[in-house]
């Protein structure tokens, strides 16, 4: 399997990508169709032999993850992080290989952190719209403008 590392134009190293590249180089099957995760004899991992072949419970405990953590939880975590970083529904669909928006929308539920990010971004936009120009401020006072772009009647002025 040919490993394509991340583009050189990225501004910083991506540890996970580098780690995955090392795994592929060491363990993956040969060729473009080579399996990335294989059993001891190079065969496909199946649900019935996955836990034994990977020693999954030992790996989960060693990683400090909670008991009962499933392999599929990694997919969920990755997609949740992508959604939290601002990925659109279409981008999530592409990452997950889904043709409908239903699955992607699961990962775009509102969170307090995301609400805070949105509020901060809106605040920055308001701040950018404000001016320190005293001539503008004095004109606003004459016109009865409150400085927020609202006219005397509370209507947005353009």
Image (spheres, helix red, strand yellow):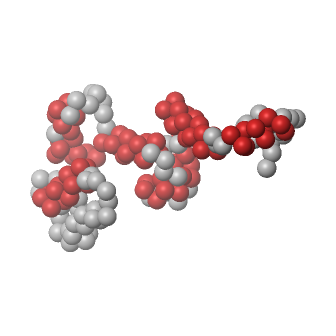
Res. 44 image quadrant: bottom left
Residue found at the very far top of the displayed protein: 67
Quadrant in which the N terminus appears = bottom left
In the rendered image, the vertical position of residue 82 relative to residue 22, given as above or below: above
User: In the image, is residue 8 above or below residue 143?
Assistant: below
Answer with left or right where residue 128 lies relative to residue 14.
right
> Which percent across, then down, holds residue 71?
30, 42
Residue in front for this viewpoint, 132 or 150: 132
Q: How many marks overall?
A: 0
Q: Is residue 97 left or right of residue 42?
A: right
- Residue plotted at (73% across, 43% down): 136
In terms of depth relative to the viewer, which is nearer, 14 or 143? Answer: 143
Residue 132 visible in the shown view: yes
Residue 30 figure quarter: bottom left
Task: Tell me if I can see residue 45 in this picture.
Answer: no
* Residue depicted at 22% across the width and 29% down the height: 64
How far across and how far down the image is residue 72, in percent? Answer: 35, 43
Measured as percent of width and height from the top left, residue 6 is found at 28, 62
Q: Residue at x 49, y 56 (%)?
A: 91
Residue 79, how many percent across, how many down? 42, 46
Question: Along the line of sight, which residue is nearer the eye, 134 or 46?
Answer: 134
Q: Residue furthest bottom?
A: 31
The residue located at (43%, 54%) in the rendering is: 96
- Residue 101 vs 35, above or below: the answer is above
Query: Which quarter of the figure has residue 28?
Result: bottom left
């Amino acid at each position: 399997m040919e490993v394509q590392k991340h583009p050189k134009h990225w501004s910083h190293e991506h540890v996970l990508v580098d780690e995955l590249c090392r795994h592929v180089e060491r363990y993956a099957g040969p060729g473009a169709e080579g399996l990335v995760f294989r059993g001891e004899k190079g065969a496909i991992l199946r649900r019935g032999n996955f836990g034994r072949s990977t020693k999954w419970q030992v790996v989960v405990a060693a990683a400090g993850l909670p008991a009962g953590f499933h392999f599929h939880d990694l997919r969920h975590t990755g997609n949740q992080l992508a959604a939290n970083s601002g990925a659109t529904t279409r981008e999530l669909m592409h990452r997950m290989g889904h043709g409908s928006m239903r699955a992607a929308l699961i990962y775009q539920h509102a969170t307090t952190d995301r609400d805070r990010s949105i509020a901060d971004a809106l605040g920055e936009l308001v701040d950018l719209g404000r001016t320190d120009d005293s001539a503008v401020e004095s004109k606003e006072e004459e016109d009865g403008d409150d400085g927020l772009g609202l006219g005397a009647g509370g209507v947005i002025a353009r």
